[in-house]
Image: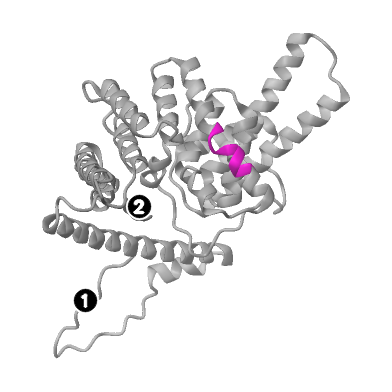
Amino acid sequence: MGGQAKGKKKNKPKRKNNRPNKADDECVVLSPQERMKLRMHEKAKKKTAEKYSAQQLLEKAFMRAVELSPDVGHSKYMYLGQIHTGQEAVDYYTRGIQVLLSTLDKQTQMTQPQAGAAAPLDEGPELPTVKDVSVAYCSIAEIYLTDLCMEEGAPDKCREFIDSALQYHHDNPEALQLMASYLFSTERNQEGREYLLKSVGLWLPAQKQSAASSSTEEDMQNDIPPYESRITTAKLLIEAEEYEMAVDVVEGLLEEDDEVVQVWYLSGWVCYLQLEKAKDQQEREGREVTEEEMEEWKALKEAARLHLTNAKKLYSKLRCDDQPLLDHVEQLLGELGGEMEGEEGDPDVDEDYEPCSDEEEDDAEAPMEH
């Protein structure tokens, strides 16, 4: 967006400029579609600037809260950990965990029945739980898998924090998935696969049941990991060659939000891999292709083309900046016969979209290696 308007000079009338404005001159040669894209992009830039201004105000507010009551309330530390990176984020999360544990210890003392005293009422929904401690440890472990992965002793620290997360909540899907990521990164693939399947088994069946019954029960929704975490789930399932389960995860993501380029890419990628796996199996068996197999292969190919086409179109509309992902999409489309023609699979884009960037993609990790 342009800078602030300059102040007018006193006693000097502004001379009318009859020369065409460069930006206006460029708009003259733009097509209606291109002009619309330009307006949408400018609107998105303005919205992004407003978002970062709001984030800065929130950061100041939470820093003020830390000054006023450093030992009460863990949420401010969790937020500050989210908006910072590296060791600074680790420090905020660590302080938040200390406050959490202190609060839980006080709650335990208060809930212990005393002689001649009635037991207190059940804990309110706003009070912290051991699950909050587990989630906080997961946040630190994830930093040692990403930002601080090159630090000395990073793998050991990562494993330590994952173990702590599981100690406080052994059925935390995010902690189990982090353990799977850690084990895959250390080439202990079979162990990683076991943790991954256990993690997914804790929430995917419930999500599918909820979708089938159109249920919106809060408890069921709370057990489902965040959107970005489920993108990582899909990547890990693809890495573990659990393609059918990966399809279920990706379908759930698309139903929730169909304006995420990486999700369309993963959906097309997994269909492509299913097709290649089916062809390899048929070749190993050394037999003729059945009519049923031909139909299945055709369906997989068309699904892969459709979803990868959607990924490419959405990439352009959202003005994304992830060249490796785009290169792989185009490579796969080239092998599958090119983009799908027509507008059937063209995903709608909300007018209030925000252009994606490498910074935002970091939350869902980088695209899979290929």
Q: Secondary structure at mark 1?
A: loop
* Residue corresponding to mark 1: 6
Q: Is residue 194 left or right of residue 293?
A: left
Image location of residue 29, percent across then percent down: 52, 65
Q: Amino acid at mark 2?
A: Glu
Residue at (51%, 39%) from the top-left corner?
Answer: 326
Give the class, few, some or many, for how many residues have Cα within 10 Å of label 1's Cα (few <14, many ≥20).
Answer: few
- What kind of secondary structure does the magenta stretch mostly adopt? helix
Q: Amino acid at mark 1?
A: Lys
Q: Residue furthest left?
A: 67
Magenta stretch containing residue 229, yes or no?
no
Q: Secondary structure at mark 2?
A: loop
Which coloring applies here?
Answer: one colour
Q: In the displayed structure, would residue 222 be above or below residue 27?
A: above
In this rendered view, identify the residue nearer to me: 17 or 208. 208
Viewer can see residue 366: no
Image location of residue 138, percent across then percent down: 34, 35
Give the class, few, some or many, for how many residues have Cα within 10 Å of label 2's Cα (few <14, many ≥20).
Answer: few
Query: Marks 2 and 1, how far apart in space?
Result: 58 Å
Whether pointer 2 and pointer 1 mark residues with C-beta atoms closer than 8 Å, the reply is no
Q: Residue furthest right?
A: 291
Q: Which residues are magenta?
A: 201-208
* Residue corresponding to mark 2: 123
